[in-house]
Amino acid sequence: MKRPLSVAAVVAILAFCAVSLMLYAGARLNVTSSFPPGIYWVVDKAPAKGDLVLFCPPQQAVFQLAHERGYLPGGTCPGGYMHLLKRLAAVPGDEVQISAEGVRVNGQLQVRSQPLQQDPRGRSMPHPQSAPFRLGSAEVLMLSDYSRLSFDGRYFGAVPQAQLGEVVEPWLVWRKTPL
């Protein structure tokens, strides 16, 4: 009976080593519905408008609320939050307007950006300012153009550019149809 246990232990150790090596090499796993679940690969470049970017949510009340409601799982970011994967939709100097119609960047309505009034459990969603505003020299807006249910900039507004992390590209994803 010891042999099956030792084989299982070896398999578990090899799997752990393989996953660790992939993470070290640049693989990132997305399990949220903001973008297709799967494996994304880190790209060696500075974040630019339109890129998929991992970022740590700033320690603000809106993110604490999201964490308490289960929109934002725990992770390794300050505040105990998980990294978020979003598209860099607006950069410093861009004009942004968040309204019931959706998010406009420089007058252009963004795809699947209409905010929900309530979450699936009937709780009111947070809504940042609706008057047009220009992003400051160190602010960006992060959105999902994949899922209308994503917790993104339509609910938390601009975030500090310093929160941005790695640029990633899909490598192996298993659901490509937008939600």
Image (cartoon, helix red, strand yellow):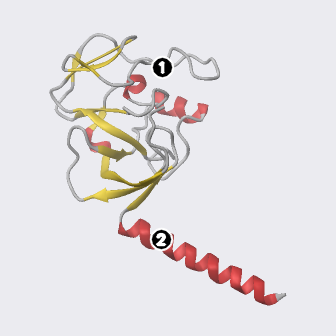
The image shows residue 159 at horizontal and vertical percentages of 32, 33
Callout 2 secondary element: helix
Q: Quadrant of the N terminus?
A: bottom right
Picture quarter containing residue 8? bottom right
In the rendering, which numbered label is found on residue 126? 1
Residue drawn 77% across and 84% down? 4
Provide residue 86's location: percent of width, then percent of height: 37, 39
Q: Residue furthest front?
A: 177
Q: In the image, which is nearer the foreground, mark 2 or mark 1?
A: 2
Residue located beneath label 2 in the image: 20
Q: Say which of 44 and 128 sits in front.
A: 44
In space, the residues marked 2 and 1 are separated at their CA atoms by: 37 Å
Q: Is residue 118 above or below residue 65?
A: above
Q: Amino acid at mark 2?
A: Ser
Q: Quadrant of residue 99?
A: top left
Number of other residues with Cα within 10 Å of mark 2, as a class: few under 14, some 14 to 19, many 20 or more:
few
* Residue at 45%, 26% in the rendered image: 148
Left or right: 11 in relation to 31: right
